[in-house]
Amino acid sequence: MDIHNPKKYYQTSNLIEETGASEHSIRRYVRILEENENYPEIERDNRQNRLFNELDRMTIVEMVRLVKEEKKGVQEASEAVVLRLNEFKILVEAQETPSEDIKMNEGTNGSYEQNERLEYAIELLEHLSKNQKELDERLKKIEAHQLMIENTVIPSEADNDSVEEASGDNEDEIIENNTGISNSPQEHKKTGVKGNLKL
């Protein structure tokens, strides 16, 4: 199945209406998305107007959500949705109009098969969503740890030497002061005289 050859196309105005984003924002998101070499080329009509298929619509809507709700940058949102292209393709396949064979057998097992595909797609999306959340949490922990390392100041050897010298100087001053008070002969003499006068 060719994802980029759908039966239905959307215009910029449709995306604006669905997302609530401005025309300028939508065009900016699309331009950045097109610059990503891993994203399929968006089709254009004879007048070079972009024709968005279901895959494009899902991708751009998710980009807008990431920017608005999760406060991601447009470039970061673009990279995030490209990583989830397989997830979006599964949704597109699940939503496709049933083939002629399925239509012919709709009275028997056609509806059942389509429901099975939808259930499988939902289960897979839930699994992918869970993995994405776990990756986001791990990334946040790594970023927090990196920030903590960057903010930790490790004292250099020169700083340690300065601290030790300052500590040594303070100890010398204390010893000198104590020695001056206890060993001054003049102060001893004065003390002795005062003692005799009292007697």
Image (cartoon, rainbow, N blue to C red):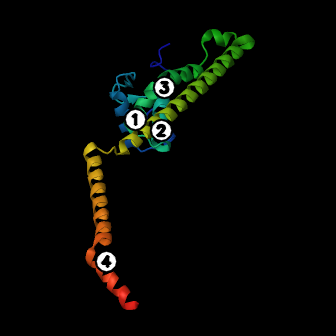
Q: Secondary structure at mark 3?
A: loop
Mark carried by residue 66? 2
For marks 4 and 1, give the one nearer the viewer. Answer: 4
Which three-letter amino acid code belongs to the residue tagged 1? Glu
Inspect this view and state whether residue 165 appears: yes
Residue at left 42%, top 45%?
22
Q: Earlier in the sequence, mark 3 or mark 1?
A: 1
Q: CA distance from mark 2 to mark 1?
A: 9 Å
What is the spatial separation of the Cα atoms under label 4 and label 1, in whole angstroms? Answer: 82 Å
Q: Position of residue 151 (x, y in %)?
A: 37, 45
Q: Which structural element holds mark 4?
A: helix
Mark 3 lies on residue: 84
Tag 2: amino acid: Leu
Left or right, 192 with reference to 116 = left
Instruction: Left or right? Give the position of 133 relative to 149.
Output: right
Pointer 2 and pointer 1: residues touching (CB < 8 Å)?
Answer: yes
Residue 27 drawn at (x, y percent): 37, 37
Q: Is residue 10 above or below residue 115?
A: below
Label at residue 188:
4
